[in-house]
Amino acid sequence: MSIGVASIGSFFFEQSKRGSLRRVMALALIVLLLLFYVGWKAKFVQLGYRIESLGQEKRDLERTNRGLRIEASSLSSQARIEQIAIKRLGMVRPAKENVVVVKRKE
C-alpha cells in the first residue's frame, strides 16, 4: 500500500480548502450578526429620540390647549357677552315687567 505524495498533498489541500470555506462562512455569519445587532441598536436609539420628541410635542400641545380653554371660557363669559350686546349692538336690558320666567317640566 503505497500512497503517492501527490495524493497526500491533494488530500491536505482539499481539507484546507474546506476549512477555509468554513472559516469564511463563520466569519461572514459573525459579521452579519454584528451588523444586525448594530442596526437593531441604532433603530432602538432612533425610536427613543422619536418618543422623546413626541413627548415634548405632546406637552407643548397640552399647554396650548390649556391656554385656549382659558381664552374660550373668558370669551364666552356672560358678562363679556352682555357688554358686547350693549356696546356694539346697542341692546338694552328689558324692563322687569317685560321679563317672563319659564320653568321646565321635570
Image: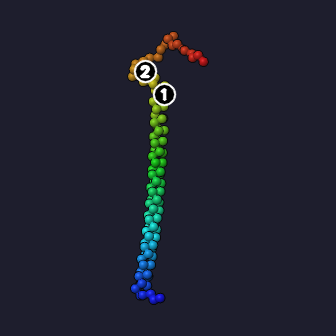
* Residue 27 seen in the current view: no
Q: Residue at x 46, y 44 (%)?
A: 60
Alpha-carbon span between mark 2 and mark 1: 14 Å
Residue toward you, 91 or 53? 53
* Residue 61 seen in the current view: yes
From the image, state whether disc 2 or disc 1 is nearer to you.
1
Residue positioned most to the front: 1
Q: Residue at x 47, y 28 (%)?
A: 76
Q: Position of residue 59 (x, y in %)?
A: 48, 45
Crowding at mark 1 (Cα within 10 Å: few <14, some 14-19, many 20+) = few
Q: Residue at x 48, y 31 (%)?
A: 73
The label shown at residue 77 is 1
The label shown at residue 13 is none
Q: Amino acid at mark 2?
A: Ile
Looking at the image, residue 25 lies above or below residue 99:
below
Residue positioned most to the right: 106
- Which badge, 2 or 1, comes first in the chain's sequence? 1
Kind of element beneath mark 2: helix
Where does the C terminus fall, quadrant-wise?
Answer: top right
Residue toward you, 94 or 36? 36
Looking at the image, residue 24 lies above or below residue 3:
above
Looking at the image, residue 12 lies above or below residue 95:
below
Q: Residue at x 47, y 88 (%)?
A: 1
Kind of element beneath mark 1: loop
Residue positioned most to the bottom: 2
Q: Position of residue 22 (x, y in %)?
A: 45, 73
Q: Amino acid at mark 1?
A: Ser
Mark 2 highlights which residue? 86
Pointer 2 and pointer 1: residues touching (CB < 8 Å)? Answer: no
Snapshot colouring: rainbow
